Image (spheres, helix red, strand yellow):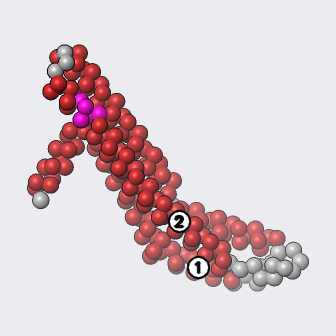
């Protein structure tokens, strides 16, 4: 177990300090994704039951105002379902940009090594690894976030559609 830890720490040190920021962003992103998944599978049903019960308790569900209230209820519930999804998407976007920042800082190290030691390959190698590892980490973090957020977005769309189907408009064909 200690070997794994030292391997990870060594890898992060090769990539430079930017990898720590990528790791923190990835941790935040996946924490928020797991929170949304938890909400969708364990807490959302109770909220939908409450909203549907409130809607079914209305005596009148056919007028223009009832339709506006229904649209408002669906919109508010969708916002509740979405929760931290915008922040998750921001983290997904931020990861490759942090990787690019690591590339730039690594290239600065390469140029610094070239300026101070000439064309010494050993001194340039550290800068090259510092330039490539953050890019790889940022892309991998972003790709995993895309997979997780796609699942969550599909589930949000599905749950919103189910809610809309539960909030029936009685007498749709009757006078408005």
Which stretch is magenta?
A: 127-131
Residue at the (38%, 36%) spot, across then down: 100
Image-based side of 81 in relation to 16, left or right:
right
Give residue 107's quadrant in the image: top left
Q: Could you say whether the residue bearing mark 1 is in a helix, strand or loop?
A: helix
Which mark, residue 144? none
Which mark, residue 154? 2
**Residue 152 image position (x, y, % from top left):** 48, 64
Q: Nearer the viewer, residue 160 or 150?
A: 150
- Measured along the vertical axis of the image, is residue 10 above or below residue 44? above
Q: Nearer the viewer, residue 99 or 118?
A: 118
Q: Nearer the viewer, residue 116 or 47?
A: 116
**Residue 159 image position (x, y, % from top left):** 56, 72
Q: Could you say whether the residue bearing mark 2 is in a helix, strand or loop?
A: helix
Q: Nearer the viewer, residue 80 or 25?
A: 25
Please give the residue where the numbered disc 1 appears in the rendered image.
50
* Dot 2 crowding, Cα within 10 Å, few <14, some 14–19, many 20+: few
Residue at the (75%, 79%) spot, across then down: 169
- Measured along the vertical axis of the image, is residue 172 above or below residue 130? below
- Measured along the vertical axis of the image, is residue 86 above or below residue 68? above
Q: Residue furthest right?
A: 175
Q: Quadrant of the N terminus?
A: bottom left
**Residue 64 image position (x, y, % from top left):** 82, 70
Image-based side of 157 in relation to 9, left or right:
right
The label nearer to you, 1 versus 2, is 2
Spatial separation of the CA atoms under disc 1 and disc 2: 23 Å
Counting residues from the start of the chain, the first of labels 1 and 2 encountered is 1
Give residue 36's quadrant in the image: bottom left
């Amino acid at each position: 177990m200690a070997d794994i830890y030292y391997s990870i720490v060594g890898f992060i040190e090769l990539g430079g300090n930017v990898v720590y920021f990528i790791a923190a962003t990835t941790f935040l992103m996946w924490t928020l994704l797991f929170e949304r998944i938890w909400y969708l599978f364990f807490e959302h049903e109770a909220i939908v039951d409450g909203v549907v019960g409130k809607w079914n308790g209305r005596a009148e569900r056919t007028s223009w105002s009832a339709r506006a209230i229904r649209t408002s209820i669906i919109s508010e519930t969708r916002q509740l379902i979405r929760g931290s999804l915008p922040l998750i998407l921001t983290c997904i976007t931020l990861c490759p940009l942090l990787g690019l920042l690591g590339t730039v800082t690594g290239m600065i190290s390469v140029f610094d090594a070239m300026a101070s030691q000439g064309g010494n390959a050993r001194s340039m190698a550290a800068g090259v690894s510092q330039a490539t590892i953050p890019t790889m980490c940022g892309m991998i973090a972003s790709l995993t976030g895309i997979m997780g957020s796609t699942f969550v977005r599909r589930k949000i769309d599905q749950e919103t559609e189910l809610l809309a189907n539960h909030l029936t408009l009685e007498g749709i064909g009757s006078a408005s």
